[in-house]
Image (cartoon, rainbow, N blue to C red):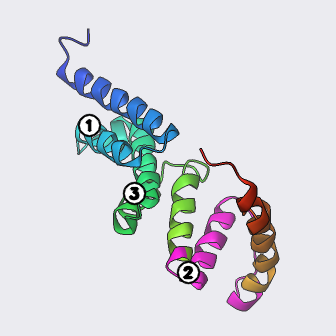
Amino acid sequence: NLVNCSSGNHTLAAELNLRAAVKAKSVAAYSNVIGFVKKGINNLPKKEMWSSHFELSLHLHSLGAYAEHALGNSKEAMRYCKAVLKQDKATPLQKCEVFKVQIEILTNEKSLPDALDMSLKYLELLGCEFPKRKVLRKRQAGPYMQETRSKYTPSLKDVKTMKMM
């Protein structure tokens, strides 16, 4: 019975805040996402957040990282990322969103060698091995990164023809 169980009420409140944050993200209301994420995290018991509410904590922190990054708050985004990345229980796929945020932040800050190292670290977690010597790793990874960037980055021509929402 959730009414009689205060910890259950807190968990329910955190879940409702997560749902609200997801909805806010879908309409790019990133300031609202942050508000819901913070309320959701604050509803979880600090000492047991990751052990008792792993999935909920993971989703809240990943959304927080994404929204803070979207708002240009790199330090706050990195704080959320670090909280997720230090969770040994999280799989590489569960860490994907925060790795992506970290790589984008490093790229935006013109720290390309660090962004590349982070990309290679993530690829290694996924089972893609590259030589250990940095020069060889970067030379091998470069074409893959360029190919990925060209697939997912619109050209200037595409941007000009995009309709405004």
Measured from the top left, where is residue 126 in percent x and y? 69, 58
Tell whether 72 sits left or right of 123: left
- How far apart are the two marked residues, 1 and 3, measured between alpha carbons? 20 Å
The residue depicted at 47 percent of the width and 53 percent of the height is 66
Q: Main secondary structure of the magenta part?
A: helix
Query: Which residue in the protein does label 1 denote?
Result: 44
Classify mark 1: helix, strand or loop. Answer: loop
Classify mark 2: helix, strand or loop. Answer: helix
Name the mark nearer the viewer: 1 or 3: 3
The residue depicted at 48 percent of the width and 45 percent of the height is 28
Q: Amino acid at mark 3?
A: Glu
Measured from the top left, where is residue 48 in percent x and y? 28, 41
User: Which comes sooner in the sequence, label 1 or label 2?
Assistant: 1
Query: Which residue in the protein does label 2 denote?
Result: 114
Q: State which quadrant residue 35 falls in.
A: top left
Tell whether 51 sits left or right of 151: left
Camera-side residue: 4 or 38? 38
Query: Which residue in the protein does label 3 denote?
Result: 68
Is the residue marked by circle 2 packed among few (<14), some (14-19), or many (20+) residues within 10 Å? Answer: some
Q: State which quadrant residue 160 falls in.
A: bottom right
Q: Amino acid at mark 1?
A: Leu
Measured from the top left, where is residue 23 in percent x and y? 46, 33
Camera-side residue: 49 or 165? 165
Q: State which quadrant residue 39 falls in.
A: top left
* Quarter of the figure with the N terminus: top left
Q: Which residues are magenta?
A: 108-136
Name the mark nearer the viewer: 1 or 2: 2
The residue depicted at 41 percent of the width and 48 percent of the height is 30
Name the mark nearer the viewer: 2 or 3: 3
